[in-house]
Amino acid sequence: MGVDKGKKQKIAEKVEATEQIDEKLVLSIEKLQEIQDELEKINEEASDKVLEIEQKYNEVRKPIYDKRTDIVKSIPDFWLTAFMSHPALGELLTEEDQKIFKYLSSIEVEDSKDVKSGYSITFNFNSNPYFEDSKLAKTFTFLDEGTTKISSTQIKWKEGMGLPNGNANEKKGNKRSHVEERLAS
C-alpha cells in the first residue's frame, strides 16, 4: 500500500516550509552575530578610553599616595595591623610571618605601562634579622592567551633564618614556610 498523493503533497510542503524557516533562522543568527560584533568593538573602544583615564588619574594620585606613605611609616606596625585586620589575610599569617611583617615599611603597586599587561607589588622592608633584601617584589604579567605569568624576588635569607638553613618554621618534609610561599611565589 502506498501513501496517497495528498499526503505526499503535505509532507513535501512541510519539508519546504521547514527549509525556509531554517534559512530565515540562519540569516537572523548571522545578522545577530554581526550586531554583536559591532557591540564588542564599541565595548573594546570604551574599555580603552576608561583605561586611558584611569592611567591619567593614577599619575594625579601618585603624590597623594606618597604623602600617605610618609604618614603610614610613622605609625608603628601599620602594615602588620592592616594585614592582621583583613578578614582573609589575617587568617593566613603565622606567628613567624607576623614577626617578619613588623619590619614591613611600605607596599607599592605599580601597573605596567599598559595596565592590561600586568602589575607589580613591591614590599619594602626595614633592616631585619630574617633576610638581606630591603625589597621583595611579585610581578603578574597577563599573557595574550589568557594565562598569567608570576615572577618574584628570590629571598636571600640570613644565616639560620631561611628554611634551607633551618629556622623556627622548619617542618617535616621539604615544604617552604608560609611567608616564603606568599612573598616569593
Image: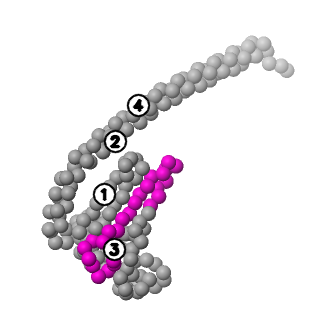
Disc 4 versus disc 3: nearer the observer = 3
Are the residues flagged by discs 2 and 1 in contact, CB closer than 8 Å? Answer: no
The disc label shown at residue 66, or none: none
> Which residue position holds label 1?
109
- Name which residue type carries label 1: Val
> Which residue position holds label 4?
42
Q: Position of residue 97 (x, y in %)?
A: 31, 76
Q: CA distance from mark 2 to mark 3?
A: 34 Å
**Element under disc 1:** strand
Pointer 3 or 1: first along the chain: 1
> Which residue position holds label 2?
51
Are the residues flagged by discs 4 and 1 in contact, CB closer than 8 Å? Answer: no
Q: Position of residue 125 (x, y in %)?
A: 27, 71
Circle 3 residues within 10 Å: few <14, some 14–19, many ≥20: some
- Horizontally, residue 19 falls left or right of residue 91, namely right
Q: CA distance from mark 2 to mark 4?
A: 14 Å
Q: Quadrant of residue 13?
A: top right
Residue 101 in view in this figure: yes
How was this image coloured?
Answer: one colour
Pointer 4 or 3: first along the chain: 4
Q: CA distance from mark 4 to mark 1?
A: 30 Å
Q: CA distance from mark 4 to mark 3?
A: 46 Å
